[in-house]
Amino acid sequence: MPVTDTLRFQFTIPNLNTEVPLTKRCVLSVIATLFDPLGLLGAAITTAKIFMQLLWTLRDENDQRLDWDQPLPPTVGEAWRKYHEQLPLFNEIRIDRCVIITDTVSVEIHCFSDASEKAYGACLYLRSENAVGEVKVRLLTSKSRVAPLKCQTIPRLELCGALLAAQLYEKVDKSIKITVKSYFWTDSTCVLRWLAANPTTWTTFVANRVAKIQSITQGSRWSHVPGIQNPADLVSRGISPNDIVLNTFWWQGPSWLEKTEEHRPLLPDNLPTDKEDEEKRHTVLAGTVSSIAEFNQLYIGKFSSYSDLLRRTAYWLRLIKLLRTPRKDRKAPTFLSTDELKEAENTLVRLVQREVFVEEWKALSKENAVSKSSPLRWFNPFVSQDQLIRLGGRLKHSMESENTKHPAVLPPRHIFTRLLLRYYHERLLHAGPQLLLGVVRLRFWPLGGRSVVRHIIHQCHICFRSKPSTVQQFMGDLPASRVTVSRPFSRTGVDYFGPLYVRPAPRRTAVKAYVAIFVCLCTKAVHLELVTDLSTDRFLQALRRFVVRRGRCTDIYSDNGTNFVGARNKLQEFLRLLKDSHHNDIVSKQLAKEGIQWHFSPPSAPHFGGIWEAAVRSAKIHLLKVVGETPVSPEDMNTLLVQVEGCLNSRPLTPMSDDPNDLQPLTPAHFLIGESLHAVPDPDLSSIPMNRLTQWQLTQQRLQNFWKRWRKEYLCQLQGRTKRWKPAVRIDIGKLVVIKDDNQPPMRWKMGRIVQTHPGDDGTVRVVTLKTATGMLTRPVEKLCLLPISDDNDDIQSSEVHHQQS
């Protein structure tokens, strides 16, 4: 109000209709109208915040969270109605716009913080004094927050309140243009103790907030104020609008602010401190280790790098040596020397030997021979001056070093041995087994060295990625379409190959053409169609000619479009055709009208359609031998394709016998026309009486004989598994794999993690869904290379793989 130079609020408080049920939506709409950016009404608005948080915890009869438009319980609704009735009192408050006294000579900011189980907050007061000693104290701003629903201790909430006070002061300090002195007050002695110490002393929760407070309030003093004299207590607990209107304690702060500094409260000596222990817990290895093996497991087992283990051990040995040295003789620490690293290495080898070779150590220490069952009985071992078990060997008179003539013995499967071999393997740039074992034996002699070295190299994922081996999954059962009697071409596989080059009559230049090959899955019969271009219309025309000449199909199988990516650059046009949604919609509608169902193989899995892939190879061999890349006319090419089709349909389905009395071999043509397309003409049978069978019966009997021979001679040959006969490979979700890409070198193949498996009817997983750095992929297991990650280094290698992907 310009006339009186005061601030006032003009809240439009909606009236509550007793006939309309009170809901959470109604309460929130009222709270949203209380716009108070300075926090002058913060003590009363905190009550509304606490009430709104209470509504979020209410549950209905079905133990479900209360919906926005569900009526509130009667007790809760009555509490809100009492608070709502007092809200119009906010419009009667008048606040002086000027918060400092005239002719000010000094200005101070006093920040108070407090917390309760329901909320925590802070309020700032501006204290100004003129030359004659008159003092004016007024509320400047406040801020509050409700306590989290997750239970927190009061000292921690008090610390959050102190941080809120520091952040509020930081905003005020940046906004005002005058120089002020700042004071901070809290009634928590625990917070004062936390703020007086280094943040690293406390746990993470306390340390982070203490560090922020100390950074903001650097140069200011935190003091203690009794809880009854802390105005921030009103913010943390909340008061009603009726209690804030004439509350002098809220608007002007405690009475001692208007007095001189000696009247301000001090922290009494006998004041008890809070017993909130937030010091960092330090793990101390108490007592003695029961055995060397337990110590090695606790110490060596914590390291994933041999160099890190060696350096840490060297520092520990240096510390032990310094503690045993008088303080006056100690030298300033320097970098680790070669002697210190060598001593640390000998210490580790000594610990490992005393863990594994217990009986040998006892016998050799007494200058006795090892037992006949000892793995060291072949090497004439002895204990050297550095208390290591070394090989006696037969190189005593050689000119080599002592480590080469008498290397230290290492157990084969110990974690220290694996760390050592892995370190040398990486240091030698991922050397092979022979080189790695040769270099290691210049200083150490791992028992069973060849098998241990091979195991280390096998587990190295970098070596594996340079020459990965794909999964060879157990060969699956043949689908029903391959082993069920059906009309020829009722279940058909389709594929494209090409391009071929034809020269139409009016033109002199050759143009591209392709061949659509249809293969009967039951009889291996082949049908070839010449296609002049890769378009939807040409494909449907080829399919229509095939259906008219061979009969309608019930199922058509084909490769997925991604099978044509990569090295098959000549089929990029076909790939675009398969990925064209318009083409797929037209083909699907056309096939649906004809009652034909289309089946796709998994992506990048051409072996799922091996029967038509083999037919493509055979057809291309015939064409290359006859015409090669020489252009011919479309009529000649069509004639040639029909002849190639005849050759393919005359191939025997079963092995041919050397006995001339045996029947002619069964071919796909027998199921099409009743005999081989290239068979020798039958002899004249006109003299044989035909009174026993009619011509139709004779034809039907001959066709039935073909199917009997198909069952006896051909179907039984499909029983055996000629490849991938080993037991099924276990494919688990979460495994890291390398995804084979025929167009990239092995080191650039993508990494992925299995997120879903798709087992077949026999329970064997042959298709999986992978998560890669670029998205999700579906691939057959034959395109995957399982990383050789063991249990002891799974986490290490997993982090390395993630780093390489990123």
Image: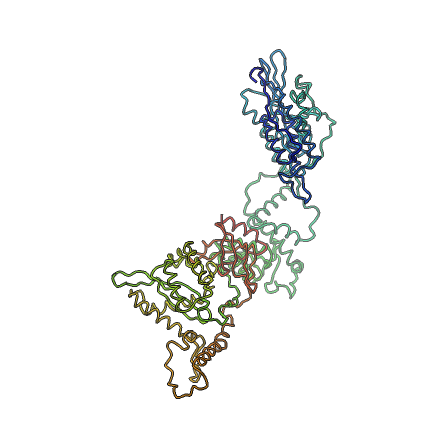
Relative image position of residue 109 (x, y in whole percent): 61, 22
Q: Quadrant of the N terminus?
A: top right
Q: Is residue 771 above or below residue 722?
A: above
Q: Residue at x 55, y 66 (%)?
A: 727
Q: Is residue 15 above or below residue 456?
A: above
Residue 31 placement: quadrant: top right
Q: Residue at x 36, y 60 (%)?
A: 538
Q: Is residue 169 above or below residue 463?
A: above
Q: Is residue 213 above or below residue 591?
A: above
Q: Residue at x 61, y 15 (%)?
A: 129
Relative image position of residue 349 (x, y in whole percent): 60, 54
Tell which of 488 and 154 is nearer to you. Answer: 488
Tell which of 795 and 38 is nearer to you. Answer: 38
Please, which colouring scheme is shown? rainbow
Residue 745 falls left or right of residue 306 = left
Tell which of 281 and 289 is nearer to you. Answer: 281
Relative image position of residue 219 (x, y in whole percent): 59, 25
Residue 318 placement: quadrant: top right
Residue 435 falls left or right of residue 292 = left
Q: How many marks?
A: 0
Identify the residue at the far front of this view: 19
Relative image position of residue 668 (x, y in whole percent): 42, 73
The answer to whether residue 178 of the structure is visible from this angle is yes
